[in-house]
């Protein structure tokens, strides 16, 4: 009897863990950034605490030099401006020590003069007031000049010749001061601009104009920071503080290009200009009303509960019971030991639920939950309200013109026996149901901005003289693309190498770069080892958060600006192994990563310097203030996971060759584990990735994962005529995916060569796709751990989307595979340097010099006479 009750309890747990929503959803609200306090606190490592006191000391010494009391608040406005002007002048002196003392004083002012205040709110207000004065007097431009000096000195031949082996916190002291001032100014202006502050309105507009314009040396600030990342990854400047660099680059990009709301406005503006209707559905808004839960039970499951004997037999056929069930299921269950628990369960886990369980009224936690400064976001359980009854799916179905044409071709061949090329209208001879089907498809047809842009490019390619190209608007995204185009492959590889090094699943032996240089102190602590461990993990999480946000912002803005700009960046990310890198990131216990507590609130700025400081020795400090029955999550980790899933979706959507990469890398079990995270938006992007590859996974997988299939049906947008659940359509057949990628590459290169000939030739001359970055020691791969000669994958029928590469088995890819923790293979240098691949633009075929042989030159006239002039051409046959 006791054994039976234990079995009943276990069975109910396994069914109800997802089906009945026993655990509340994470109330994480996806946004461009976290709270201002948390974003500022993440700028500093816990090991930088002692340097904060040096800023106060520098300020006091400087005020003593001016014969003024060391209290900023006691100075009137004119005196404060006078002091700042003197400090700016001091930034230009030749003495480094004198120069950096002035820089530390300005950093102390930007930090809100925390030694003179008693609360976080007071410190924030002083920071807000000081940033206005600092920016108006030109401090930002002065610190850009300081940054240029530090970069030049770091990359000078004398410094580069000295190989720095053990890089520590001391080596990047001056750079961290400079970057901290730039970051605080940028983040404060961004925060006030988003709030709509009147005091900052003019300053924010001027600042956005400044960061989107070239510096005096002709470079954009974003390009300069990308160059710092590239030098760091190449080993030329191992002491660059990567966390501060990527954080500043992220905020510069976010403010310069715009966040989610700006993207939505730009997209609708471009669609209206192109004669298209604006988009009314927004993914972020729809997912706020969506619940993270397993789909309702099927009618078969209900019958199983009513008939235990039938249930026992059906269970032996391996049904998936809930979303996060493991890929491998026990096939040896007997009817005897299954019938007991199932029969006594009473159907608690399998009762059919209304489809309304997927949607709920959105409750903004920031509206009713206090979040004190520098404290992690603790979630509140959602209020128990009756779920709104809805009878419709969350998305309006869509269909492409390509799908309508395919439907017409199939119908014509089936009923009439002929096909009409390029005829999208004629329905002659087709039965009435086909007419109604075509009308339904046309009613739901969606024309994307990318379709219009591609059609325009095809027209220009066919008629380059008669077709007039539209004027290129110099918006921020266009200016950025033109600036990074010559070195875009190196920049993408550098960002991915940093992301690889910061990934929690990366192994130390594979790390070719040391991203911990701005965390590790010169003398390793003996007593505070636990604090250092937390600091290092926190450091990695912040880097992942910033890099994922940078890549996503670039992809989204380039896709709206022009589809081929997006495709150019996407292909370089794919060739640099971004897809296996993201899969490697998710090949961990993702629920643990989301709930990581790598935060010590008492050590976050400004709590660590304001008020009485408690004793943090031993176990007196707490990582988080977790309260019972209130689920904890790490905002930055959930944010990073969603960003990486969105990046993966953007790289793979409508690219069958890249979908096959997901299949070859066996991503389905990895993605299914991610469904354990109870957040609707994260689950949506995971289900999208699973939907893309469902047709390739086979019938047995679909039979075993019917709960996942139901979740896809309920939560992911329907594409009419998309036979994703059965794999019967033509697109599930093994096409030549090499040609698909090469054709896309040719179109992208033609676009770049026509619009940006000089930058494109520089890109080609440098050797595209990271082969130009020989100083990276990456050879076109990330971290040196994902490439290798002779990587082959899968079977001959599965194209991998890389030009001139085959997918087979063997080579030395198995070693790299184990390192990534997924099964499959990785693109190698042979793929990236293949002759066919190079022809389609990766090695700059347009600027190659072709040497004609002497024999050809001597006999050219004879060849012209015989083969051209005297050769009759049958134009009809041609």
Image (cartoon, grey):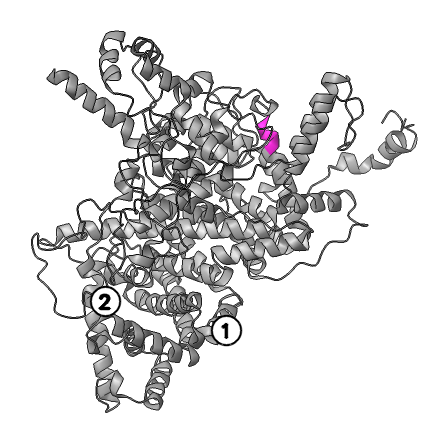
Q: Quadrant of residue 413?
A: top right
Q: Is residue 318 above or below residue 671?
A: above
Q: Is residue 691 magenta?
A: no
**Quadrant location, the C terminus:** top right
Q: Is residue 30 above or below residue 876?
A: below
Q: Kindly identify which residue carries mark 1.
A: 206
Estimate the spatial distance between the alpha carbons at disc 1 and disc 2, rounded to whole Å: 29 Å
**Residue 630, label in figure:** none
Q: Can see residue 184?
A: yes
Q: Secondary structure at mark 1?
A: helix
Magenta stretch: give its range: 736-740
Front-lying residue, 757 or 458: 458
Q: Is residue 791 in sight in this rendering?
A: no
- Residue under the image location 53 percent in, 41 percent down: 571
**Residue 739 belongs to magenta span:** yes
Nearer to the camera, 717 or 544: 717
Residue at numbered disc 2: 606
Vertical comparison of 268 with 409: above or below:
below
Q: Earlier in the sequence, mark 1 or mark 2?
A: 1
Magenta highlight: main SS: helix
Q: Position of residue 584 (x, y in %)?
A: 36, 36
Place of residue 787 in the rendered image (x, y in percent of width and height, measured from the top left): 42, 34
What is the secondary structure assignment of the residue under circle 2?
Answer: loop
Q: Position of residue 42 (x, y in %)?
A: 29, 59
Q: Residues within 10 Å of mark 2 (few under 14, many from 20)?
A: many
């Amino acid at each position: 009897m006791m054994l039976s009750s234990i079995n009943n309890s276990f069975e109910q747990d396994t069914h109800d863990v997802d089906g009945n929503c026993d655990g509340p959803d994470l109330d994480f609200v996806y946004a461009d950034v976290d709270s201002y306090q948390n974003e500022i606190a993440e700028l500093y490592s816990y090991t930088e605490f002692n340097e904060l006191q040096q800023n106060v000391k520098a300020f006091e010494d400087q005020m003593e030099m001016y014969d003024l009391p060391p209290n900023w608040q006691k100075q009137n406005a004119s005196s404060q401006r006078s002091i700042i002007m003197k400090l700016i002048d001091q930034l230009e002196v030749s003495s480094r020590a004198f120069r950096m003392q002035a820089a530390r004083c300005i950093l102390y002012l930007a930090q809100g003069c925390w030694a003179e205040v008693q609360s976080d709110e007071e410190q924030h207000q002083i920071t807000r007031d000081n940033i206005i004065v600092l920016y108006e007097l030109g401090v930002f431009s002065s610190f850009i000049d300081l940054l240029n000096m530090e970069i030049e000195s770091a990359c000078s031949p004398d410094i580069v010749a000295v190989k720095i082996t053990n890089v520590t916190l001391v080596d990047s002291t001056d750079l961290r001061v400079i970057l901290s001032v730039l970051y605080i100014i940028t983040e404060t202006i961004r925060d006030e601009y988003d709030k709509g502050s009147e005091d900052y309105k003019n300053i924010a507009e001027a600042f956005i104009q400044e960061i989107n314009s070239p510096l005096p040396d002709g470079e954009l600030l974003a390009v300069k920071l990308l160059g710092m990342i590239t030098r760091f990854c190449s080993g030329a400047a191992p002491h660059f503080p990567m966390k501060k660099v990527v954080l500043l680059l992220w905020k510069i990009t976010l403010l310069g290009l715009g966040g989610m709301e700006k993207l939505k406005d730009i997209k609708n503006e471009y669609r209206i200009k192109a004669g298209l209707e604006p988009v009314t559905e927004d993914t972020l808004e729809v997912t706020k009303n969506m619940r993270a839960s397993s789909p309702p039970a099927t009618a078969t499951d209900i019958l199983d509960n009513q008939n235990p004997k039938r249930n026992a037999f059906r269970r032996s056929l391996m049904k998936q019971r809930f979303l996060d069930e493991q890929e491998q299921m026990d096939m040896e269950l007997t009817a005897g030991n299954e019938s007991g628990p199932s029969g006594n369960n009473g159907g608690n886990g399998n009762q059919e639920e209304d489809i309304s369980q997927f949607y709920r009224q959105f409750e903004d936690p920031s509206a009713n939950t206090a979040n004190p400064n520098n404290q992690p976001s603790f979630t509140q359980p959602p209020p128990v309200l009756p779920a709104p009854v809805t009878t419709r799916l969350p998305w309006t179905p869509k269909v492409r013109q390509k799908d309508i044409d395919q439907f017409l071709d199939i119908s014509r061949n089936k009923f009439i026996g002929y096909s009409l090329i390029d005829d999208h209208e004629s329905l002659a001879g087709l039965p009435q149901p086909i007419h109604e089907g075509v009308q339904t498809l046309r009613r739901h047809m969606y024309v994307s901005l990318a379709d219009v842009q591609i059609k325009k490019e095809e027209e220009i390619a066919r008629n380059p003289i008669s077709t007039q190209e539209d004027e290129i608007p110099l918006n921020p995204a266009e200016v950025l693309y033109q600036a990074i185009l010559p070195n875009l492959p190196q920049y993408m590889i550098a960002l991915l190498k940093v992301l690889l090094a910061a990934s929690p699943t990366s192994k130390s032996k594979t790390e070719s770069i040391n991203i911990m240089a701005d965390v590790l102190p010169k003398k390793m602590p003996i007593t505070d080892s636990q604090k250092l461990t937390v600091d290092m993990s926190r450091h990695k999480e912040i880097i992942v958060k910033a890099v994922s946000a940078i890549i996503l912002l670039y992809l989204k803005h380039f896709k709206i600006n022009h589809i081929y700009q997006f495709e150019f960046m996407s292909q370089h990310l794919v060739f640099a192994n971004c897809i296996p890198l993201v899969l490697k990131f998710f090949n961990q216990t993702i629920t643990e990563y989301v709930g990581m507590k790598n935060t010590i609130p008492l050590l976050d700025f400004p709590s660590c310097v304001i008020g009485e400081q408690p004793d943090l020795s031993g176990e007196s400090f707490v990582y988080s203030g977790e309260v019972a029955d209130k689920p904890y999550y790490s905002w930055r980790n959930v944010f990073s996971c969603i960003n990486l899933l969105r990046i993966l979706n953007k790289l793979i959507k409508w690219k069958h060759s890249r979908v096959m990469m997901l299949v070859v890398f066996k991503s389905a079990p990895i993605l299914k584990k991610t469904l354990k995270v109870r957040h609707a938006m994260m689950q949506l992007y995971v289900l999208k990735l699973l939907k893309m590859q469902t047709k390739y996974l086979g019938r047995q997988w679909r039979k075993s994962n019917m709960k996942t299939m139901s979740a896809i049906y309920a939560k992911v947008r329907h594409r009419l005529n998309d036979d994703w659940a059965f794999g019967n359509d033509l697109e599930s057949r093994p096409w030549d995916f090499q040609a698909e990628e090469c054709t896309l590459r040719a179109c992208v290169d033609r676009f770049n060569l026509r619009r940006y000939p000089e930058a494109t030739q520089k890109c080609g001359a440098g050797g595209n796709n990271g082969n130009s970055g020989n100083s990276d020691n990456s050879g076109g791969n990330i971290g040196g751990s994902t490439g290798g000669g002779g990587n082959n994958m899968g079977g001959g029928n599965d194209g991998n989307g890389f030009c001139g590469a085959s997918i087979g088995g063997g080579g030395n890819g198995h070693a790299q595979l184990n390192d990534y923790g997924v099964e499959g293979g990785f693109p190698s240098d042979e793929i990236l340097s293949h002759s066919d691949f190079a022809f389609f633009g990766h090695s700059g075929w347009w600027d190659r010099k072709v040497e004609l042989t002497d024999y050809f030159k001597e006999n050219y006239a004879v060849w012209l006479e015989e083969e051209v002039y005297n050769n009759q051409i049958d134009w009809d046959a041609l």
